[in-house]
Structures are given as C-alpha cells and as structure tokens.
Image: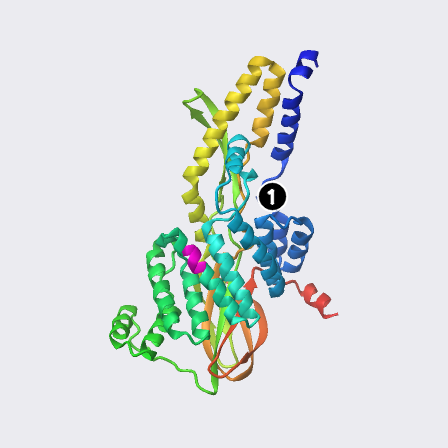
Amino acid sequence: MSTAICSGFPGRIILVLLVLYLGGCATYSRQASSMRDNLLIGRADLARQTAEEKDQDQNDVLACLNKGMLRRMTNDYVGSNQIFEIAKQRMESLYGVSISDAAASVTINDAVRDYKGDRYEQILLHAYMAMNYLQLGELDSARVEILQADVKMMEWGEQPDEDPFVRYLAGMIYEALGEDDQALVSYRKAMGVYIATSNEQLITVPVMLQMDLLRLLADQGLRDEYRKLKSEFGLANFKPAELGDDSGELIIILNNGLAPIREESAIMTFSPEVQSNVRIAFPVYKYESAPVNKARLKTSEKLFDLETVENIDRLARQALDEDMPLVMARAITRAVVKYQSQKSAHEQHALAGLLLTVTNLATERADTRSWTTLPQEIQMTRVVLPVGQQDVSIEIVNAAGRVIDSIDTSVNILPRQHSFLTRHWIAPVPVKTYIANSK
C-alpha cells in the first residue's frame, strides 16, 4: 500500500474494519434459531439454558423479553417477572427516539438501534407479567400491571393499538378481585376492540366474553342492555351461572405455538437522487402462518374446547406492515448516503472506494428483531368446577382429531373464587425428558 494511502486513510480503514465487524454479525433471526429449535422439539429447558448463557446483557430489551418468557415456560414465575421488569424499565427509558440511534440507522443499518419493542409487544409485556402474578396468587400485583397496560394504550390514543385480550384479561382480574363494576367496563371495552379489530386480527367477539358480559349485566340488573346483547349474540338459551359455596371457576389460558420470525430480504432499486441502482435490505415474514393445533380442557366430567382470544401472529405481521413505509424510507436514504460516500472515496483513491463499497454491502442488513418467544395464539376457556382438588388435562388435538399431547395438572378450586392456570404448548416434550426429570 502506498504511503499516500496509509497517511490519508488510516482512520477510515479502521472505521471500515469496525463497521465490517458490525455488518458481519448474523441477523437476529439466525441468532435466535437455536433457541427456537429447542422450543420446537419441546425443550423449553434447553432453550432457556441457551438464552441465559448467551445473552448476558441486562440492558438488551429483547434478551430480557426472551429470557422472561422462557423462565415462565419453565414455571419460574418470580424469575420471569424479575427480568421482565428490567425489560419494562429499559423500554421506558428508550421511549423517546435517540438522535444517535437515528443517525446510526441511516449510516449503518436499522439493527444498530436500541430495541424498544413494537407497541403490541410493549402491551403484552404487561399482560405476561400480570399472568405471572396470577400464577403466584398475587392478584393485586396483577391488577397493577393491567392498569399500567391501560395507561400505555391510552398514551397512544388510537383504538387499533388497544389489545382486546388485554382488555378481557383486565376484566377477569377485576372480577377475581370482586370489582364487578370495573370488570363490566373492561368486558365492554374488550367487546368493542374485538369488533374494531376483527378484520385485521381475524377474531370475532369470543363466545366466552359474550357470556361473561351477559352474566355481569344480569348480576347488576341492567336488563335492557342484557336483552339487547343477548339478542345480538344469538344466545337465546343463555342462563347466567352463579358460583355457590360448593363451586368455583377455573380460567385456563394457553399460549399455543410460536410467533412468526422475521427474515431478511434485499432488492436493487433505482434512486433518482443518484441516478443509479442501489441495494436495500428490509425485514419480511417469508412464510404464511400455519394453523395451530386445537386445545381442549378435560375434567373428570367433561371436555371443554378452548377458544382463540388473541392472534399474535396477526399482530406481528400487522405491526411490520405499518412500519414498512418508514423502514423502506430509511433504507433508501441509507443506500443513497452509502452510495455517495463510496463514490467520494473512489474519487480520492480506487482502493478506498472499493473498501467502502464492500463495507456498505456488508452492513446493509435488515432489522429482523422481534419477540419470537411469544406464542402464535392465546386460547382460553372458563369452567365451573366443584370445590376441592381437581385433576385436569389440557389436551392438544391435531387436525385429524387425535390427541397428540396433554398437559396434566391438579388445581385447588375454592368456593366462589376464580383460579387461573396459564400454560405454554409448542411441541410435545420428549419422553426421555420425563425419564430424566423423574430420576
């Protein structure tokens, strides 16, 4: 290398090497593959081990979200909320757009920006923290999380950003606390959001919610609204059930499947600004969602089908669709900046131009990050059971109607009380795991 090159470009070459290092990092979808591979064979324990070992940065929102979800999958609800709390506080600190982040996304790529989560992820974080508290029997703490979720949704002030399941979950928590007035308000809001988002989320008002709403209307003597909604819902034979001293309610919430994973796509597009084709990379969901397996609750007396109450797959895809105009605008701006910088470098020295061209190609990566340990769907059911210890099974049924797996447990039903059971199902746990754990 000539003396002129060495004296003129040492700082630039160092920068090139640094940025090449950043660009050489794999996209998030590749980094997350081993974690998801373990989940897809039913080994949440191994997925958690991988995440805990690799992701040591407590300031990384996405690492905390995934570790929190994997901890709750392995029944560590206290540990799950501890790491979720870190993610929540970090999200709040990143709520404002960082100028340095914005500049880096234009000069390098979107993946160098701090990850603060899509809106639906920020809301669901509160929901999962609330569900952790429900598993721990801490209803008041669950209520706090739901109130925080409400504040967050109201900050955005747009109804499409309200989450119908979170509204429904809020109503169930209020009802479990004996706050029936608040529960009724939440059930009404949930119904409205389900209706408003039905085209996007492909979920109508769940039948369970319809019956819950009617039951509380009847309890509070709101006969006109009760008769009106009963007719609209087509539930002519509905009769509100009441809990007695010999019965309580079990609420099953099942997280079924895995949310879609974003991948990278790249195209060449013509830029009028530089009168040349430029390469841009952007995130996509390459595969259509596959139907999840159906689930049902088996008790000693009966089978109860679970109903889909949240379509997270659709939330993820919709969020990306809404972000895509800005993603593409940043990508094109970035491509123009990189093209002009490499052209300028080439005019000064051919080797410098070549190095910067290689650097720009290597660093043009899509931001494929998302909370990929979320489920594809949330399903639930509510059943009245006799007081006492009850053995129940959540059965997973394939398209042929055959039971392919079951989650067996026992629950203690208290008189006139609401008990919550939240579980995850992605794939059958290998038999060898049961054998190993039984030793």
Image colouring: rainbow
Q: Which residues are magenta?
A: 149-153
Closer to the camera, 279 or 302? 279
Residue 222 in the image: state x and y as whole percent: 28, 76
Residue 439 in the image: state x and y as whole percent: 75, 70
**Chief secondary structure of the magenta span?**
helix
Closer to the camera, 143 or 112? 143
User: Is residue 400 visible to the viewer in this orientation of the structure?
Assistant: no
In the rendered image, the vertical position of residue 159 relative to residue 397, given as above or below: above
Which amino acid lies under the numbered mark 1 shown in the image of this protein? Answer: Arg
16 is within the stretch colored magenta:
no
**Point 59% across, 74% down: residue:** 409
Q: Is residue 391 left or right of residue 216?
A: right
In the rendered image, the vertical position of residue 282 relative to residue 138, given as above or below: above
Q: Quadrant of residue 7?
A: top right
Q: Is residue 334 left or right of residue 38?
A: left
Residue 279 in the image: state x and y as whole percent: 50, 28
In the rendered image, the vertical position of residue 178 relative to residue 265, given as above or below: below
Quarter of the rendering occupied by the N terminus = top right
Residue where numbered disc 1 is placed? 30
User: Is residue 120 visible to the viewer in this orientation of the structure?
Assistant: yes
Q: Residues within 10 Å of mark 1 (few under 14, many from 20)?
A: some
State the SS at label 1: helix
Residue 4 in the image: state x and y as whole percent: 67, 12
